[in-house]
Image: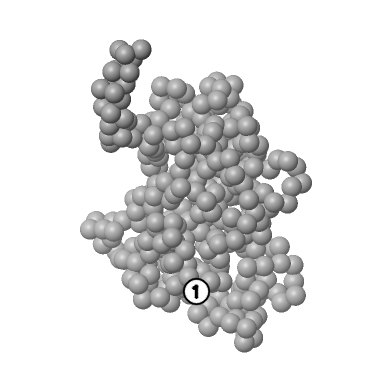
Amino acid sequence: MAISTTFRSIFWPYILAMALTPQWVSLAQLQVGFYSNSCPNAESIVSSVVREFAQSDVTILAALLRLHYHDCIVQGCDGSVLIQQPAGAGNLEKSAQNHAGLRGFEVIDRAKEQLEAQCPGVVSCADILALAARDSVFLSRGPFYELPTGRRDGRVSNVSDADNMPEVHESIDVLKAKFAAKGLSGNDLVLLSAAHTIGTTACFFLESRLYNFGGRGGSDPSINPSFLPELESQCPQGGDVNVRLPLDRGSETVFDAQILRNIRSGFAAIESDAQLYADPSTRAIVDSYLDPLSPLFGPFFRSDFADSMVRMGRIGVRTGVDGEVRRNCSAFN
């Protein structure tokens, strides 16, 4: 007993100190190649599944990118947006109005099934979603980037958590503030908005911009006059609000800087994108990426976008023993 007590009194402070040193803390941080030993084929399995789905539906790539963003921007990249059980529950995050139209869940489920067959209980759903988004960018001819992994899945999914998401009708100052609250900058706001280089939006999000802008009737004056009839034709007043149109006019399936050119020229489909060029600080960021010398002397859109995705992928992550690794991505363990 005396030896045991002496051992604890002498060595416990050193053990505690070691546990708090950076090299021990780093064990619970995200890192590139996190699954290289525990599940070496993890990233290739996810990539293969995403590629398989994209072969029959290229629009799934934009859907997966959006799904990852919606997961991260609410309460962190913890896979909470994937929870769908108990079925019919109206209090889950997925049922939030701000998440309307989210899809791609079947891709994540397929990847999870294959990973569980090979490495049961190892790869988190949050990481699968982050990897699927990375692969979606690449398969859309965007940059491939090294993605730190090691996220754990959250154990909470509440509809109210999505109430404070950035919205398309909010002012640029509100959008900046909401991004800042997540540790993201004005540069990140521009870059992550540029993810709209792929994908579509619904007429629902254009109604007020086209027919009652600012509650005063009429359309948003920032819309290019040659673009306005096109939008009105696709989304007529009183028409079907579920009709979809490209976010990036003329380039909706290819990852490129055309979205920034469209924003600069008044061809942005949604209001939040258009506001990026109305605000002096974000306008300067847009212009910097469209400078002909940008690829040579910086900033470089593709690499900066990749860096911004990595930053977003770190929001509110759970690592180490925090959270869980779900066996089924749509349900808590």
61 vs 233: above or below: above
Which residue is under mark 1? 171
The C terminus lies in which quarter of the figure? Answer: top right
How did the renderer colour the structure?
A: one colour
Q: Image quadrant for the N terminus? A: top left
Seen at 62% across and 71% down, the residue is 206
Q: Is residue 117 above or below residue 92?
A: above
For badge 1, the amino acid type reads Ser
Q: Is residue 129 above or below residue 35?
A: below
Residue depicted at x 49% and y 42%: 130
Residue 3: x percent and y percent?
30, 12
Question: In front: 127, or 10?
Answer: 10
Residue 162 visible within the image? yes
Q: Is residue 241 left or right of residue 150?
A: right
Q: Circle 1: is it few (<14), some (14-19), or many (20+) Cα within 10 Å?
A: some
Relative image position of residue 131 (x, y in whole percent) = 48, 39
Q: Residue furthest left?
A: 297
